[in-house]
Amino acid sequence: MKHLNITVQGKVQGVSYRATTKAVADQLGVRGFVKNTEDGGVYIEAEAESTLMDMFIEWCNEGPERARVTAVHTEEGDVKDYRNFEIVKKKIA
């Protein structure tokens, strides 16, 4: 099991990025959460097996049709054993 903290930059708010991220995560079996950041980006914590995580990160670099992803930064972290994948409504700084 792998845990990644993922920061996505670009035109990723107001384009259904979070909703589509949840759909992709659910399809792949990725667990964690996604939320908007105050600086206009998106922050994701994701957990999955390595091969599934690779597919998820590949999708994060593309995003939904109306998104324009300019950067995706990942950082490994400790596994938190999330039960599912959620959209968090509150923005973070």
Image: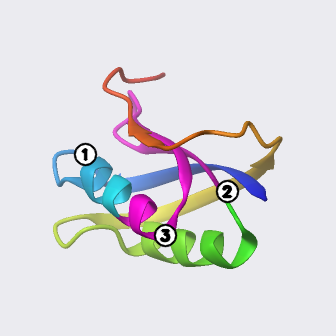
Q: Residue furthest front?
A: 83
- Read off the residue under disc 1: 13
Distance of mark 2 from mark 1, alpha carbons? 19 Å
Q: Amino acid at mark 3?
A: Leu
- At label 2, counting other C-alpha atoms closer than 10 Å, the crowd grade (few under 14, some 14-19, many 20 or more) is some
Q: Which of the marked residues, 2 or 1, is nearer the chain's N terminus?
A: 1
- Read off the residue under disc 2: 74
Q: Amino acid at mark 1?
A: Gln
Q: Which residues are magenta?
A: 24-47
Count up the numbered dots: 3
Q: Amino acid at mark 2?
A: Thr
Q: Which of the marked residues, 3 or 2, is nearer the chain's N terminus?
A: 3
- Read off the residue under disc 3: 28
Q: Residue at x 19, y 53 (%)?
A: 16
Q: Which type of secondary structure does the marked residue at label 3 adopt? A: helix
Q: Position of residue 68 (x, y in %)?
A: 29, 67
Residue 32 lies in the magenta stretch = yes
Q: Which of the marked residues, 3 or 1, is nearer the chain's N terminus?
A: 1
Q: Say which of 2 and 43 sits in front.
A: 2
